[in-house]
Image (cartoon, grey):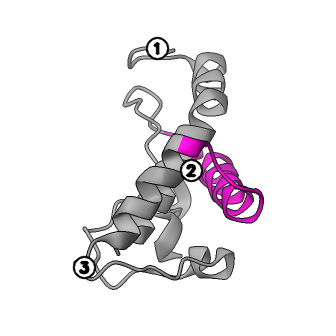
Amino acid sequence: WYSPDDRDKSEQLLFEKVEVKPQALEHLFSRACGIAFRVSVDNFSLLDHDIKPFRDAVLTQSEKFMRDGMPARAALFLQGLNALDVNINTNLDPSDLHQCDALQLGSRNNVDGVSDCIDCE
């Protein structure tokens, strides 16, 4: 399911509801590679949109995947990332998901200075 840019508020909230799990997996994959993850609301038309609830939902889902398990193919991919020897964080722990990564890709803030980076707060 994908809805292109220029979504209104209600369409954006639906988009975010659908995107929580995929972006939680992306967050875990990024963490395994030692790269800070930034949620993507993928909508430039809502400049005053508060991303904090979405960012928090992605983090909560990441923690749930770590605690309760994730889809088999995602787990296999994460296992493959952990097997590589390229400065990868192989000891992912739910408590680490709140930590900022060593590698930062720059910072972009949203309304009221709320960062879109899960790992940078």
Q: Are marks 2 and 1 in contact (CB under 8 Å)?
A: no
Q: Are marks 1 and 3 in contact (CB under 8 Å)?
A: no
User: What's the residue type where badge 2 is placed?
Assistant: Ala
The image shows residue 30 at horizontal and vertical percentages of: 39, 62
User: What's the residue type where badge 3 is placed?
Assistant: Asp
Mark in front: 1 vs 3? 3
Sooner in the amino-acid sequence: mark 3 or mark 2: 2
Report the residue at 39% width, 71% height from top: 82
Of 44 and 34, nearer the camera is 34
Sooner in the amino-acid sequence: mark 2 or mark 1: 1
Q: Give the residue at mark 3.
A: 85
Q: Give the residue at mark 2.
A: 24
Q: Quick check: can you spot residue 21?
A: yes
Picture quadrant where residue 10 is located:
top right
Distance between the alpha carbons at the discs numbered 1 and 3 = 37 Å
| Tally of numbered discs | 3
Task: Give the secondary structure at mark 1.
Answer: loop
Q: Quick check: can you spot residue 36?
A: no
Distance between the alpha carbons at the discs numbered 2 and 1 = 19 Å
Report the residue at 77% width, 57% height from top: 68
Q: Are marks 3 and 2 in contact (CB under 8 Å)?
A: no
- The answer to if 66 sits in the magenta stretch is yes
Q: Could you say which disc has been placed on residue 3 in the image? A: 1
Q: Quadrant of the C terminus?
A: bottom right
Secondary structure mostly seen in magenta is helix
User: What's the residue type where badge 1 is placed?
Assistant: Ser
The image shows residue 118 at horizontal and vertical percentages of: 52, 65
What's drawn in magenta, residue-wise?
48-72
Classify mark 1: residues with Cα within 10 Å, few (<14), some (14-19) or many (20+): few
Mark in front: 3 vs 2? 3
Question: Is 82 situated left or right of 72 in this image?
Answer: left
